[in-house]
């Protein structure tokens, strides 16, 4: 299975594709600054666990995990937000709200995720006024990926 998209939607998950995501991020940052509203990014990464065994069809497990995770993300994504699949195991949400809402959405995703073959990590960063999309994405890249731990 290859990672492909038509520029708007990821062919496997039907979530936003990278070009569509990046254009929306640029536009949403400008709108957020103009309206003095909050915007944040949440990144989820699925990491293959060491429990994967020989004889298991890893491509089927990969596809099932990606599809299952995409359905979870779709179920919590609000109409005003956008979720994209940006890499093989990477999903990122643009959330038009403050950190509290982002933490709630993230917690819902993490509580719903169950897989013996993949663990899920998360990171979250709030946009700062005047920040470019590249600066925001770089800050997100530098955030520590945190596995879910119920409080």
Image: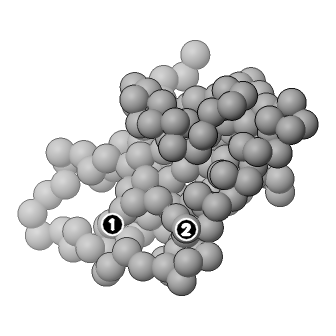
The image shows residue 102, relative to residue 17, as above or below, that is: above
Horizontal and vertical percent position of residue 105 = 69, 38
Instruction: Say if mark 2 contacts mark 1, CB within 8 Å.
Output: no
Q: Is residue 134 visible?
A: yes
Q: Residues within 10 Å of mark 2 (few under 14, many from 20)?
A: some
Foreground residue, 58 or 106? 106
- Of the residues tagged 2 and 1, which is closer to the observer? 2
Foreground residue, 1 or 56? 1
Q: Which residue is mark 2?
A: 19
Q: Quadrant of the N terminus?
A: bottom left
Horizontal and vertical percent position of residue 53 = 14, 58
At numbered mark 2, what does the secondary structure look like: helix, strand or loop? helix
Q: Residue at x 36, y 43 (%)?
A: 119
Instruction: Tell me where residue 39 sits by quadrant.
Output: top right
Q: Residue furthest left?
A: 54
Q: Is residue 140 visible?
A: no
Q: Give the spatial CA distance, label 2 vs label 1.
A: 23 Å
Indicate which disc, 2 or 1, sits on the residue closer to the N terminus: 2
Horizontal and vertical percent position of residue 33 = 80, 35
Q: Residues within 10 Å of mark 1 (few under 14, many from 20)?
A: some
Q: Please, which colouring scheme is shown?
A: one colour
Q: Residue furthest top?
A: 151
Query: Residue 48 shows which numbered tag?
Result: none
Q: Which residue is mark 1?
A: 62
- Locate residue 70 relative to residue 25 in the image: left or right: left
Instruction: Tell me where residue 96 sits by quadrant.
Output: top right
Q: Residue at x 48, y 23 (%)?
A: 149
Instruction: Tell me where residue 40 sits by quadrant.
Output: top right
- Locate residue 52 relative to residue 22 in the image: left or right: left
Horizontal and vertical percent position of residue 120 = 42, 42
The image shows residue 130, relative to residue 91, as above or below, that is: above
Q: Residue at x 61, y 76 (%)?
A: 8
């Amino acid at each position: 299975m290859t990672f492909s998209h038509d520029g708007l939607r990821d062919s496997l998950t039907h979530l936003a594709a990278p070009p569509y995501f990046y254009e929306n991020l640029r536009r949403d940052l400008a709108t957020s600054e103009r309206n003095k509203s909050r915007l944040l990014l949440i990144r989820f990464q699925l990491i293959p666990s060491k429990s994967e065994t020989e004889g298991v069809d890893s491509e089927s497990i990969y596809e099932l995990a990606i599809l299952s995770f995409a359905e979870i993300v779709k179920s919590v994504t609000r109409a005003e937000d956008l979720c994209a699949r940006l890499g093989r195991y990477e999903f990122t949400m643009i959330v038009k709200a403050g950190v509290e809402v982002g933490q709630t959405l993230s917690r819902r995703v993490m509580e719903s995720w169950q897989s013996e073959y993949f663990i899920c990590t998360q990171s979250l960063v709030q946009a700062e006024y005047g920040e470019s999309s590249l600066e925001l994405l770089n800050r997100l890249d530098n955030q520590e990926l945190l596995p879910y731990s119920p409080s």
